[in-house]
Amino acid sequence: ASGQSLDEAKMINKSLSSLTSVIHKLSDEQGKKGSHVPYRDSKLTMILKDALGGNCRTSLIVCCSPATSNAHETCSTLRFGRRAKSIKNKARVNQEPSALELKEAVAQLQRKNNELYSEVEALKEERSMLLNHSDAAEESARMVDDLRAALRVERARAEQLREEKREQEERHAESMEELTQALEETKAALAAIRIEPPPPSPPRG
């Protein structure tokens, strides 16, 4: 197949795949309320929505081939039919609702609407609180960043002071070494000088 025929074959296969998915979902979730059935996946399942899972009595005709070459397709079709047979619909006579029933339905919808409105308001309030917390968290993060920046500056300043102190100690050590050397030289020079005693004074008559 090619061109338009190929496109049609793709659409048919997609619709049949969606139908199989719906049949599996209905048979697996039989008796469970509120479960999602993917009727909207294709036009075929949208058309068959009421027939498969609604208020209807539905007949499904499964066609099989007796040929051995089609055994795989026959088994697959029979499994599909068995799945579809497991779906149970509770058909009831459609009746025109009375004014009282319509009034009760409207009141129920109004109550549901009020509940949803309350939930929306609660979600809005929760969102506002989350936004406030988010703003506070951002402010805290900014403060932490500022403190980290100040800490980096102080660390750099402390490192600079340590370097200056080290250089000063080195200069002081050099000066002390020079002074010590000069003192030793002075001591040596003084030791080399001989001081002669003064001559004796003449006797007094």
Image (cartoon, rainbow, N blue to C red):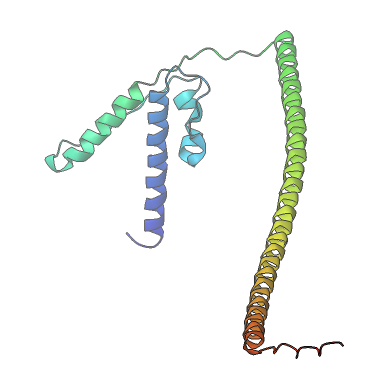
For the N terminus, which image quadrant?
bottom left
Tally of marks: 0
The correct choice, above or below, for 37 with respect to 68 in the image is above
Q: Residue at x 69, y 68 (%)?
A: 165
The correct choice, above or below, for 47 with respect to 200 in the image is above
Q: Residue at x 63, y 78 (%)?
A: 177
Quadrant position of residue 15: top left
The correct choice, above or below, for 178 with respect to 112 in the image is below
The picture places residue 11, in percent across and down from the top left corner, at 42, 49
- Left or right: residue 6 compared with residue 199: left
- Left or right: residue 160 compared with residue 22: right
The picture places residue 180, in percent across and down from the top left corner, at 64, 78
The picture places residue 187, in percent across and down from the top left corner, at 65, 82
Quadrant position of residue 80: top left
The picture places residue 172, in percent across and down from the top left corner, at 68, 74
Q: Nearer the viewer, residue 196 or 96?
A: 196
- Left or right: residue 164 compared with residue 87: right
Q: Nearer the viewer, residue 165 or 78?
A: 165
For the C terminus, which image quadrant?
bottom right
Q: Of all residues shown, which one is farthest toward the front? A: 205
Q: Nearer the viewer, residue 154 or 179?
A: 179
Q: Nearer the viewer, residue 27 or 60?
A: 27
Q: Residue at x 76, y 47 (%)?
A: 139
Q: Of all residues shown, which one is farthest toward the right? A: 205
Q: Of all residues shown, which one is farthest toward the top? A: 100
